[in-house]
Image: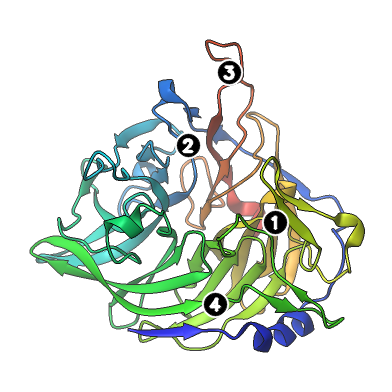
Amino acid sequence: MRLLTIPALAVVPLLLAGVPAGAAPADAPRPVRAVAETPSLFDDEAGGDADADDPAIWVHPTDPAGSLVVATAKNGGLRVYDLRARERQSIPTPAAPGPEEEAGRFNNVDLVRGFRLGHRAVDLAVVTDRGRDQLRFYRIDPVTRRLVDVTAPDVPYAFSSDQAEVNTQRTAYGLGTFTDRDGRVYAVVSRRSTPEVGVFRLVERAGQVTYRPVDRLTLPSTFTLPDGSSWSPCTDPGDGPQVEGTVVDPATGVVYLAQEKVGLWRTRLAGGRFAEAPVPVERVREFGIPASYDPEEDCVTDHAADPGFGGRIAQDVEGLTIYPTGRLTGTLVVSSQGDDSFYTYDRRTNRPTGRFAVVDGRVDGAQECDGAAVVATPLPGFPGGLLVVHDGRNTPETPGRDGEARPDTNFKFLDAGFLR
């Protein structure tokens, strides 16, 4: 496995030349409304520490009404929903290997179609387990519409060298899968609290699934601004600017990476390796603004000192998904967590095409969105395709025994036809 490190200063001219700088967009986002929502997940002891994060959409091969949404709930494991947003299955995370070790914590999920397992092709849900620093795999049974664990018992750590390093939780985080023309399947996986991204090839072993590392790159952490000054995004002490949102265009192998506090990047896979240096699509609104870490408030940004080098996206850059309208045409959707909206880009040219927000309607809107997933296939109740987005602040609030609002998250289901 080779390691590709992008020189921080060398990449900055690309970043500053290719994207117009400017403040937040003056136009209001287009309002869109969800038609359904999943049950609340509560991130407290009574709720099993379930915290919604990232969805994926499985389209049933013969019965569209039998399609499913598979979603992560961090310590709460996986949840599987039908098209009416009703829970069909709950899958727990793996237990901690020892009393002082980290238990499983499922962060991101993506799907693989037609993976060769034994003598048949199956569909897989692939999950990053950030607690154990592993990938986990679940076969989707089209008859029972249930997920079955097919993870090999000896899957390796994705990034860590031993259990002690796993316990530091610089572990597998964001995820996007890709199947090349020869049927080889890869997972592009980011590493928590670092700017590292790895490529892993999925392989079958005795009827189960494991993986091996193929390539790795490190995005920049420090940037030279047009005025000659140096800038780094504010993070927790000792951490680097991590990537979470990851998606691979299935037709081209183009990889989009959401570096949360820096911006949106693109690169490309060829032969399972990063074939070109990452280049920016757009930077965050806060790019270049001085910020300092405060233990009481995390990072404090001095907006009054904004030098005007930022883009439109309000940090963090989070969920990424592609709505295809043809083999090479469609829309890239990017979650702008800081302003509760989504920016859209032309799939082929990456030209900005608009902005929308999920607002209150039949159900409440979506705020603080982490993950999103979309399919263009017409489904019952969703003739324009299905868009599923995470809602990080579900309402109305539900009080706990102490009278305080319980931490409540879920997923919103929308007809995706507005993305055409």
Amino acid type indicated by mark 4 = Leu
Q: CA distance from mark 4 to mark 1?
A: 28 Å
Query: Is mark 4 in CB contact (under 8 Å) with mark 3?
Result: no
Q: Which mark is residue 51?
A: 2
Of callouts 4 and 3, the N-terminal one: 4
Q: CA distance from mark 3 to mark 2?
A: 15 Å
* Of the image marks 4 and 1, the number of the one nearer the N terminus: 1
What residue does disc 1 label? 315
On the image, numbered disc 3 is attached to which residue? 398
Residue at image position (28%, 42%) is 100
107 vs 26, left or right, is left
Can residue 182 be spotted in the picture? yes
Q: Amino acid at mark 3?
A: Thr
**Marks 4 & 1, CB-CB < 8 Å contact:** no
* Residue beneath disc 4: 328
Earlier-in-chain disc, 3 versus 1: 1
